[in-house]
Image (cartoon, helix red, strand yellow):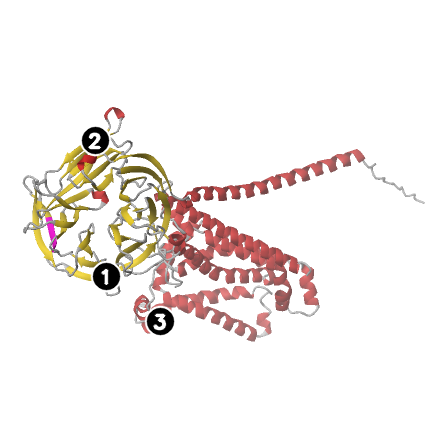
C-alpha cells in the first residue's frame, strides 16, 4: 500500500511594518500628485488672468480722458506791433509767431513770452491791412489783404540745427509767390475778406472787395529747363454771386472747392476745379434759427470738413457728400453742444480730425469729429478768448484773451479717435455717401481719417465660425455616432485614429491649400459643387434603398458594420459626375458664366475667396476636435444602459436617441463648444483663404476679416503705443472675451446636462 506524502503550505506572516511603509508612500504620492495638479491648474488660471490684465493694461489708455496743464502766462510779446490777427507754433512748441494788424510778424518764446524778432512787412505807404487769411496749418501759408487791392503771401518757417548737440530753432519768413505784392483787384478796392492756398505747383487766392465783388486769382508755377528759375503765370477772374456782405471765405487745400458765407449765414458752395469756368454747386443756410449766428468757421485737417461755431456755443460739422448720380452737395453731419457761450476761435489739429475751440467765457474745448466726442472743457481765462493756436503735435495750446494776456497750456490727449460710437456704431466718414461700419486703419496721406470700427471684424469672426460649424458639426457628430455606436471595432480602430491625426495638420497648410487650390477650384466648378450638395444625399438614400431590396444572401455576405464601406465608391462616383457636368450646367442654366449671372442678374457680389472656402477649410480643421470628443462621449456610455434598453425591446435607433445621446450630451456639447472656440480664434486659414476684407455681408459668396486675422496682419505695421496699436490689443481682448464667454457657457450647460442625465 502506497502512502501519499502530503505537504501543507502556510502563508507567510503578515509584515505590518512593511505594509505601513507602502501605505505611507502611497499616501505621499497621492498627496504629491494632488498638489502638483493643483498647482498646475492654479498656474493656468493665474496665466489666463495675467493675460487678461496685460491686455486690459494696454487697452486702458484708450479711454483715458484728455487733460490740460498750464505752463506759462504772459503779456502779448511786442504789443506795440499791433493787435493779433493770427497765432501759430512750430513743431516743438518752443517758438510761437504772431501776425498783427500793422503787418508785423513777431516770433517769441512760448516759455516766457520773450521776443525773438519783430519784423515789419514791406507794404506801400498809406495802405492798411484790411483782411487776413491762412492756408492749411501744415503749409504755414498766410496772406495779408490790403486797402489798395493788393495782397502779400508769406510763410513762417523754422530751421532746426544742433550746434554742440544742443537744439537750436531759427525762425524765418519765406515768400512762396515772391516778395512782391500781388495785385488782385485792378480797380484798387480794399480786400475785406481773403482766402489762400498754395502747393508746389500752383496757388489760388480768393478775395472779396468792399464793393461786394468776389475775385479769384490763380497762379501756375512754371520751371525753366535752362536755369531752374520759377515763373508765376497769373490768371484773374470774377465769380458771380448773389450774396450780401461777405463774412467768411474758405478755400480747400486742393484748391477745388470754395465756400463763401455772408452776414446772414448763407453759404455759396463753388466748384473751382476749372479756374476758367467755376461752377456754383449749392446755396445753403448754415444757421436756420434767427436767434443764432455764425461766430467762427474753420476747416478740419484735410480741408474736407467745415466746423461752424455759433453764438450759442453749438458746433456743427459739414462736409460734401456725393449722391448716386455723383453730384456733390454740402451736408450737415453732426453737432456738438458742450459749450454754452459764443465760439470765438477754432484751431484744427494738424494730423488728426480733432480741434480746439475758444469761447466768450474764457474756456477751451477739445473735440474729435469722427469719434463725436467732447473730450474736455477747461476754463483758461476770466475773460473772453479771441485767438487760439495749437501745436503741430497737438500737445500745446496757446490762447489770447481780451486783456492781451497769452496763456500756454500743455495738452495730454493721446487717443481722441476712440469712442463707443466710433468702435461699434455707424460713423459718417468724410468722402462717404452715408454712415457705415468701416475698418481702415491707414492710408497714404496724413489727412486720412482713421476708421477703427470693430463691428465688421467682429461680424467676420462670427461669420467665419458660423460657416465652419455649419459644415463641421453635422459631419463630425453624425460620424461620431456611427463610429461609436454602429461601427465594428476593427473598422473603428482604423477610422478614429485617422480622423484624430487630421488635427495635427498645420492650419497654415490648410489655409495655403484653401487659398491657392480650393478657392479657384470652387470658382471654376461652382454649379457642380452645389449639385453635389443636392445629389449626394439623394444618391446615398437610393443606395440604402437598393441595399434593402437585395437578396438576403448578398446582404448577409457583408459582415455587420461594414456596409458603410460600400458607400465609398458611390460617393466618389457621384462627386466625379457632379464635377464633370459642372461646365454643362453653367452653360445651360447661367449663360456660361455663373459669376456674371450672380452679379448682374441677382445683384450678388462674388469674391473668389469667400465664405464657402472658409467654411470648408476651417470646418475640415474643426471636425477632428468635435469628432474625437463626441465619439469618446458616446462610446463611453455604460453598456448596461444600452443592453438594458435593447433587452426591453427598443430598437438600436431608439436606444441611440432615447438613451445614448441623452447620456452623452454633455460630452457632445463640450466638443461642439470647443470646436466653436477654435473656429473663433482661427487665424491662418481665414487669413489665407478669404479676401481679408472687413465687410458686413452674410452672403456665402463674400469674404470677411476676423479679429485674429486682423491682429496678425496689422500688428507688425502698427506704431508702438499708438491708437492703432492699442485698438488691436482691444480686438485681442475682445477675442479673449469671446472665447472665455463661449467656454463658460459651454461648461455651465455641460454641468447642467450632466446633472440632469446622471440618473440614467
Foreground of the two, 259 or 40: 259
Q: Position of residue 490 (x, y in %)?
A: 59, 57
* Residue beneath the point at 34% across and 60% down: 607
The reply, left or right, for residue 462 in relation to residue 314 is right
State the residue position of label 3. Answer: 585
Cβ atoms at labels 2 and 3 below 8 Å apart: no
Foreground: disc 2 or disc 3: 2
Q: Where is residue 586 in the image (x, y as percent from the top left)?
A: 33, 70
Q: Distance between the residues labelled 3 and 1?
A: 56 Å
Mark 1 vs 2, N-terminal side: 2
Foreground of the two, 294 or 525: 294
- Tell me the element at label 3: helix
Answer whether residue 290 is magenta in the image.
no
Mark 2 vs 3, N-terminal side: 2
- The answer to whether residue 494 is visible is no
Q: Position of residue 28 (x, y in %)?
A: 69, 36
State the residue position of label 1. Answer: 284
Cβ atoms at labels 1 and 2 below 8 Å apart: no
Amino acid at each position: 500500500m502506497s502512502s501519499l506524502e502530503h505537504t501543507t503550505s502556510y502563508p507567510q506572516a503578515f509584515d505590518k511594518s512593511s505594509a505601513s511603509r507602502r501605505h505611507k508612500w502611497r499616501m505621499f504620492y497621492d498627496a504629491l500628485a494632488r498638489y502638483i495638479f493643483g498647482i498646475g491648474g492654479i498656474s493656468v488660471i493665474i496665466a489666463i488672468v495675467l493675460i487678461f490684465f496685460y491686455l486690459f493694461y494696454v487697452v486702458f489708455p484708450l479711454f483715458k480722458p484728455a487733460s490740460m496743464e498750464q505752463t506759462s502766462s504772459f503779456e502779448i510779446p511786442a504789443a506795440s506791433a499791433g493787435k493779433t490777427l493770427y497765432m501759430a507754433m512750430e513743431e516743438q512748441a518752443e517758438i510761437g509767431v504772431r501776425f498783427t494788424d500793422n503787418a508785423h510778424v513777431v516770433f517769441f518764446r512760448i516759455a516766457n513770452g520773450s521776443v525773438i524778432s519783430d519784423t515789419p512787412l514791406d507794404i506801400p505807404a498809406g495802405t492798411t491791412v484790411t483782411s487776413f487769411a491762412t492756408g492749411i496749418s501744415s503749409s504755414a501759408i498766410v496772406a495779408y489783404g490790403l486797402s489798395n487791392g493788393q495782397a502779400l503771401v508769406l510763410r513762417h518757417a523754422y530751421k532746426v540745427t544742433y550746434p554742440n548737440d544742443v537744439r537750436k530753432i531759427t525762425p524765418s519768413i519765406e515768400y512762396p509767390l515772391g516778395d512782391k505784392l500781388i495785385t488782385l483787384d485792378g480797380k484798387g478796392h480794399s480786400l475785406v475778406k481773403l482766402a489762400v492756398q498754395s502747393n508746389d505747383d500752383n496757388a489760388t487766392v480768393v478775395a472779396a472787395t468792399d464793393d461786394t465783388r468776389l475775385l479769384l486769382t490763380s497762379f501756375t508755377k512754371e520751371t525753366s529747363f535752362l536755369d531752374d528759375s520759377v515763373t508765376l503765370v497769373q490768371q484773374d477772374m470774377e465769380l458771380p454771386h448773389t450774396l450780401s456782405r461777405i463774412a467768411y471765405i474758405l478755400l480747400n487745400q486742393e484748391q477745388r472747392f470754395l465756400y463763401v458765407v455772408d452776414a446772414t449765414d448763407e453759404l455759396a458752395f463753388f466748384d473751382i476745379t476749372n479756374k476758367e469756368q467755376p461752377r456754383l454747386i449749392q446755396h445753403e443756410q448754415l444757421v436756420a434759427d434767427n436767434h443764432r449766428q455764425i461766430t467762427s468757421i474753420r476747416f478740419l485737417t484735410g480741408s474736407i470738413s467745415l466746423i461752424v461755431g455759433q453764438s450759442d456755443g453749438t458746433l456743427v460739422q459739414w462736409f460734401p457728400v456725393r449722391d448716386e448720380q455723383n453730384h456733390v452737395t454740402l451736408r450737415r453731419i453732426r453737432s456738438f453742444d458742450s459749450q454754452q457761450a459764443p465760439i470765438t476761435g477754432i484751431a484744427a489739429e494738424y494730423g488728426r480730425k480733432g480741434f480746439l475751440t475758444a469761447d466768450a467765457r474764457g474756456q477751451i474745448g477739445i473735440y474729435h469729429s469722427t469719434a463725436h466726442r467732447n473730450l474736455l472743457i477747461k476754463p483758461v481765462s476770466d475773460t473772453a478768448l479771441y485767438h487760439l493756436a495749437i501745436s503741430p503735435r497737438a500737445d500745446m495750446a496757446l490762447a489770447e484773451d481780451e486783456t492781451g494776456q497769452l496763456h500756454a497750456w500743455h495738452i495730454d490727449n493721446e487717443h481722441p479717435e476712440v469712442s463707443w460710437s466710433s468702435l461699434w456704431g455707424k460713423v459718417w466718414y468724410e468722402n462717404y455717401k452715408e454712415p457705415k461700419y468701416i475698418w481702415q486703419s491707414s492710408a497714404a496721406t496724413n489727412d486720412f481719417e482713421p476708421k477703427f470700427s470693430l463691428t465688421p471684424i467682429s461680424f467676420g469672426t462670427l461669420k467665419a465660425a458660423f460657416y465652419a460649424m455649419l459644415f463641421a458639426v453635422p459631419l463630425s457628430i453624425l460620424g461620431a455616432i456611427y463610429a461609436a455606436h454602429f461601427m465594428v471595432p476593427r473598422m473603428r480602430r482604423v477610422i478614429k485614429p485617422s480622423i484624430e491625426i487630421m488635427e495635427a495638420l498645420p492650419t497654415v497648410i490648410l489655409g495655403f491649400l484653401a487659398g491657392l487650390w480650393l478657392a479657384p477650384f470652387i470658382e471654376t466648378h461652382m454649379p457642380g459643387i452645389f449639385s453635389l450638395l443636392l445629389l449626394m444625399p439623394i444618391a446615398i438614400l437610393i443606395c440604402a434603398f437598393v441595399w434593402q431590396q437585395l437578396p438576403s444572401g448578398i446582404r448577409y455576405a457583408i459582415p455587420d458594420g461594414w456596409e458603410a464601406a460600400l458607400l465609398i465608391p458611390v460617393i466618389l462616383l457621384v462627386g466625379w459626375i457632379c464635377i464633370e457636368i459642372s461646365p454643362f450646367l453653367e452653360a445651360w442654366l447661367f449663360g456660361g458664366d455663373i459669376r456674371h449671372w450672380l452679379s448682374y442678374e441677382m445683384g450678388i457680389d462674388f469674391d473668389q475667396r469667400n465664405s464657402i472656402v472658409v467654411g470648408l477649410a476651417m470646418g475640415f480643421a474643426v471636425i477632428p476636435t468635435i469628432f474625437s470628443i463626441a465619439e469618446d462621449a458616446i462610446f463611453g456610455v455604460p453598456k448596461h444602459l444600452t443592453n438594458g434598453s435593447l433587452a426591453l425591446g427598443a430598437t438600436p435607433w431608439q436606444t441611440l436617441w432615447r438613451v445614448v445621446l441623452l447620456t452623452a450630451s454633455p460630452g457632445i456639447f463640450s466638443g461642439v463648444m470647443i470646436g466653436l472656440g477654435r473656429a473663433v480664434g482661427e487665424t491662418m486659414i481665414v487669413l489665407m483663404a478669404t479676401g481679408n476684407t472687413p465687410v458686413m455681408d452674410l452672403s456665402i459668396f463674400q469674404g470677411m476679416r476676423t479679429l485674429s486675422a486682423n491682429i496678425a496682419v496689422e500688428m507688425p505695421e502698427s506704431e508702438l503705443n499708438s491708437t492703432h496699436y492699442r485698438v488691436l490689443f482691444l480686438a485681442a481682448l475682445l477675442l479673449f472675451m469671446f472665447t472665455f464667454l463661449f467656454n463658460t457657457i459651454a461648461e455651465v450647460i455641460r454641468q447642467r446636462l450632466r446633472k440632469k442625465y446622471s440618473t440614467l
